[in-house]
């Protein structure tokens, strides 16, 4: 059998076009592609076929050119680039520049002065003590009825209230209605707790004594005689039998929500999850989670953390400073912030650490 050979230097002949082959369409496509490639294309633009381009009349082009702003070239020499400042908060500091709503503390009225009280800082206070100037620049009141004044007989915002006319006399003194309950909530500390924490006026003698005796006993429970000083408050047992319990709900179980649930018959309520480390730092936002309304008959506070010393000190501070019936330890929070640090649901797999935490908190 003979096998045909093909010379690599020879050019094969193209077969003749079959009848019915649309050679005109192929030529038209090639022509359009060549036209699209010949047109100048600006950077960032895709080439578009001619049939899809919008037709622009000379008059419309002239009008668009006349309406375009004329920019003059800059003849001044460019300034040297500013040296970048380091620091992890450099970008955060730059975000707050040139904001019109920023108000200096010197333009804000002192909170003590707005209530008609003497400022403990005197001339060193960074807030304004000029009541006449503040009232002149203050916006008009939003109404003539203050909800807080009607409910409690006093307003804790004083002259700074946007309804101050309802509880301010002609001499800019704050009015009070005797006989009304003037308590907004228990465990409402404000900046007081923050100042006391920073000045180390809140001590933890029970926790410190327990840590010393715990270490001396080799990790076992120390004798009762060594757990001095004794509790300032006598712990009482909370009977949970036959009662409905509103579980702690982070970002949901705040004081207004718990008040609503009390109206539906809840017996026992608990605060949102409070981080022990933030409480010991005196963060107002964290201590604000511990507020208790007078309608909450049985109220608990939930603490979260992963260190026995922190949780013990936080439990001691909460027990001494707050009006609370029981303290709950968070062992079920699954969020990354708590789990990755060894707290929350991560404690479920660390029985030895949980034992140490519980012993320290109940010392």
Image (spheres, helix red, strand yellow):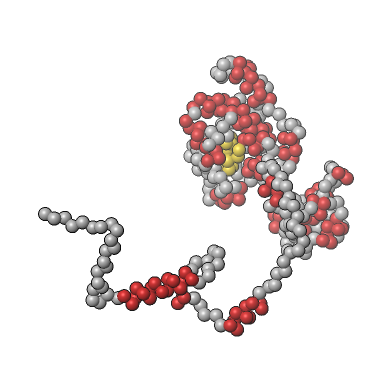
Q: State the quadrant of the N terminus.
A: bottom left
Using the rendered image of the protein, determine whether residue 240 is visible from the camera's viewpoint.
no
Above or below residue 334? Residue 363 is above
The residue lying toward the viewer, choosing from 192 and 155, is 192
Residue found at the far left of this picture = 1
Above or below residue 341? Residue 47 is below
The residue lying toward the viewer, choosing from 89 and 351, is 89
The image quarter containing residue 11 is: bottom left
Q: Position of residue 291 (x, y in %)?
A: 65, 43
Residue drawn at x 68%, y 73% as measured from the top left: 69
Q: Position of residue 329 (x, y in %)?
A: 55, 34
The residue lying toward the viewer, choosing from 272 and 156, is 272
Tell me if 189 is positioned left or right of 40 in this view.
right
Q: State the quadrant of the C terminus.
A: top right
Residue drawn at x 62%, y 35% as measured from the top left: 276
Residue drawn at x 55%, y 40% as measured from the top left: 337
Using the rendered image of the protein, determine whether residue 334 is visible from the camera's viewpoint.
yes
Residue drawn at x 64%, y 77% as measured from the top left: 65
Q: Position of residue 222 (x, y in %)?
A: 59, 18
The image quarter containing residue 298 is: top right
Above or below residue 227? Residue 196 is below
Q: Position of residue 275 (x, y in %)?
A: 60, 38
């Amino acid at each position: 059998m003979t096998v045909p050979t093909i010379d690599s230097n020879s050019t094969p002949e193209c077969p003749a076009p079959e009848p019915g082959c649309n050679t005109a369409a192929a030529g038209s496509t090639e022509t359009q592609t060549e036209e699209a490639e010949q047109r100048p294309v600006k950077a960032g633009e895709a080439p578009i076929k001619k049939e899809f381009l919008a037709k622009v009349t000379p008059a419309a082009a002239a009008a668009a050119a006349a309406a375009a702003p004329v920019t003059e070239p800059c003849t001044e020499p460019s300034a040297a680039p500013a040296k970048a400042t380091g620091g992890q908060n450099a970008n955060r500091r730059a975000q707050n520049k040139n904001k019109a709503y920023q108000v200096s503390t010197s333009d804000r009225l002192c909170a003590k002065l707005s209530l008609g009280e003497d400022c403990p800082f005197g001339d060193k206070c960074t807030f304004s003590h000029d009541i006449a100037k503040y009232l002149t620049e203050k916006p008009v009141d939003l109404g003539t009825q203050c909800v807080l004044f009607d409910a409690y007989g006093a307003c804790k915002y004083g002259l700074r209230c946007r309804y101050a006319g309802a509880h301010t006399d002609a001499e800019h003194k704050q009015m009070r209605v005797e006989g009304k309950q003037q308590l907004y909530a228990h465990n409402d500390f404000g900046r007081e707790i923050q100042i006391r924490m920073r000045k180390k006026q809140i001590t933890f003698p029970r926790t410190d004594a327990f840590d010393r005796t715990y270490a001396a006993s080799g990790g076992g429970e120390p004798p009762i005689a060594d757990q001095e000083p004794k509790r300032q408050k006598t712990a009482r047992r909370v009977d949970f039998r036959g009662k409905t319990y509103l579980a702690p709900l982070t970002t949901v179980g705040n004081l207004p929500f718990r008040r609503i649930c009390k109206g539906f018959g809840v017996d026992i309520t608990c605060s949102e999850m409070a981080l022990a480390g933030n409480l010991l730092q005196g963060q107002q936002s964290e201590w604000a989670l511990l507020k208790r309304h007078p309608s909450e008959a049985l109220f608990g506070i939930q603490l979260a953390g992963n260190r026995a010393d922190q949780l013990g000190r936080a439990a001691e501070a909460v027990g001494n400073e707050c009006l609370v019936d029981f303290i709950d330890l968070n062992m079920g929070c699954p969020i990354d912030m708590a789990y990755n640090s060894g707290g929350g649901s991560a404690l479920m797999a660390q029985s030895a650490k949980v034992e140490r935490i519980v012993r320290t908190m109940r010392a």
